[in-house]
Amino acid sequence: MVKLKFLVTGSAGLIGRQVVKDLSDTHEVFSCYDKSKPEYGNAVKMDLLNHEMISNVLLETEPDVVIHLGAMTGVDLCEKEESMASDINTKATQIIAQQCSILNTFLVYVSTDYVFDGNLGMYYEDSTPNPLSVYGKSKLEGEKVIQTFSSDWCIVRTSTPFGLHPTKKSFPIWVVENLQKQKQIDVLTDQFTSPTYVPSLSRMLIEISERHLTGIIHVAGASKISRYEMAKLISDKLGLDGKLLREISINDIKWEASRPKDSSLNVSKAISILNQKLQKIDYDVNLFIDEIKNNIILFRA
């Protein structure tokens, strides 16, 4: 295997932390961060609101591959701070795309199922996007600037990433922590996604980078499932009280930003071209639970 030089934005985040950890064994990695210094790779400060800093970091490091994970991902916060969401998710992405084109760097951009309106579900790569929120719109605009300004790119759309992280809590962790405390929680029965186990997603992002796969690829879990169904699956497997899960509708919640009801992704393309295999939710949840049980802080028998 040829040793490559990677630059990863958002390297302290839920996905980014796993990616730089996995990459650091076999490649040279520059781990870009804003506030929280990453544990793995060569830490490099990068403020996505500072366009000059972005350009300078790329020119100084001259990476072979950029995996662009850095983003403003709070869906409701994006709705309140539309200008900042655009600056981070779209304008910073344009700067990265332009610099990658100058450097002949392969750019892997991680996007979201929220570019779709959720009226149909099981979206293909060529399905027509129609985002409902500022977050979704800003990520879709990020996709557009990638295709306009980068000469060598892959857009990876994913859905509901979950896994362990020292500070960031994904949906299943929130479920486990509340049920362990015997707290009743409201869980949506009519919002469907394709939950994606972060260690699996990381391996696929690395495979895409190493094999230089281009175009748009949906990389997500191979199951369409509601939030409630996922919470119930986790509670059953851990022997927690599923009666504490209160079924509610997406229409019962007054969010700042609208969410798609069914943003599940069709992953048949990824299944056909990737060596790493996308798994059904039951398989990924089993891996996730094994990970929880090995973490003494999170799991109490």
Image (cartoon, rainbow, N blue to C red):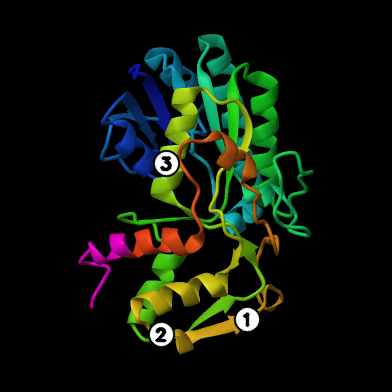
Q: Which residue is mark 3?
A: 202
Whether residue 113 can be seen here: yes
The residue lying toward the viewer, choosing from 202 and 139, is 202
Q: Which residue is mark 1?
A: 248
Q: Of the residues tagged 3 and 1, which is closer to the observer?
A: 3
- For the point 45% across and 84% down, the residue is 242
Q: Are marks 3 and 1 in contact (CB under 8 Å)?
A: no
Residue 120, given in percent of the width and then of the height, sits at 77, 58
Residue type, mark 2 in image: Lys
In what quadrant of the picture does the N terminus appear?
top left
Mark 3 vs mark 1: which is more N-terminal? Answer: 3
- Left/right placement of residue 156 relative to residue 20 reads right
Mark 2 vs mark 1: which is more N-terminal? Answer: 2
Query: Where residue 130 is drawn, which disc sits there?
Result: none
Mark 3 lies on a secondary structure that is: helix
Q: Are marks 2 and 1 in contact (CB under 8 Å)?
A: no
Q: Which residue is mark 2?
A: 183
Mark 1 lies on a secondary structure that is: strand
- Left/right placement of residue 220 relative to residue 19 reads right
When the figure is inspected, residue 200 is found, relative to residue 77, above or below; the finding is above
Q: CA distance from mark 2 to mark 1?
A: 16 Å
Q: CA distance from mark 3 to mark 1?
A: 32 Å
Residue type, mark 3 in image: Ser
| Secondary structure mainly formed by the magenta segment | loop
- For the point 42% across and 46% down, the residue is 200
10 Å neighbourhood of mark 1: few (<14), some, or many (≥20)? some
10 Å neighbourhood of mark 2: few (<14), some, or many (≥20)? few
Could you say which quadrant of the image residue 88 lies in? top right
